[in-house]
Image (tube, helix red, strand yellow):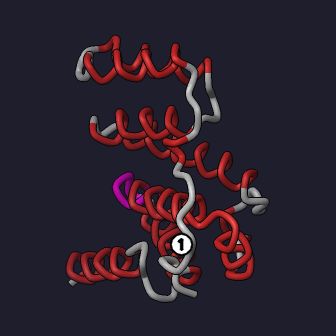
Amino acid sequence: MDLLDFKPGSMYFDEPLDLRVEVLILEAAMAYGAPKAEVKLRQAETLAPEHLSVLVALYRYYFYRHQHDAALAVASRAMEVVARRLNFTPLWQDVTADDIARATAERGELVRFYLHALKGTGYLCLRLGDVEAGLQRLDHVAALDAKDRIGAKALADVARQALQASAA
């Protein structure tokens, strides 16, 4: 299955967002680097805990500040939200190629979001030193994405090469 072969639909950021939440995200962006930025994002999260725009903003905040534990937690929550929307099992390990094919026919963008989030959690696990968990996630994405449109196989290959080089 080719994950680029789907009819484009609406993206997560096209979903309506309460004006108060939108303002909080903008205020957080303007305060980036200051402690109040995180406060604003957490306030947005309180108002819209399952809105993907909020979760992505929070994820990016933590990711770019190299707060990998916090970014991993947010990415995992985003995956839970998307898994429910796509009628996937809550356990990423149990998502199958058939699940991906079924969901891609209806919500291809959301499937790609899910797989990118899973790849991101794999990368974060690697950064946090949990190589086994990172490679498991990346390998699972690669198994679901035979053409490596998401790039998880390439990332897993680089990680394995780095491990081999450090062991030599």
Above or below, 98 relative to 117: below
Q: Residue 56, how many percent across, how many down? A: 46, 40
Dot 1, crowdedness within 10 Å: few (<14), some or many (≥20)?
some
Figure label count: 1
11 sits to left or right of 27: right
Q: Quadrant of residue 88?
A: bottom right
Name the residue nearer the viewer: 132 or 64.
64
Which residue is under mark 1? 136
The residue lying at 53 percent from left, 65 percent from top is 8
| Quadrant for the C terminus in the image | bottom left
Judge left or right: residue 19 versus residue 106. Answer: left
- Tell me: residue 158, above or below residue 23: below
Q: Secondary structure at mark 1?
A: helix
Q: Which residues are magenta?
A: 125-129
| Image spot of residue 153 (x, y percent) | 41, 81
- Quadrant assignment for the N terminus: bottom right
Quadrant of residue 59 in the image? top left
Q: Position of residue 35 (x, y in %)?
A: 31, 14
Type of amino acid under label 1 = Gln
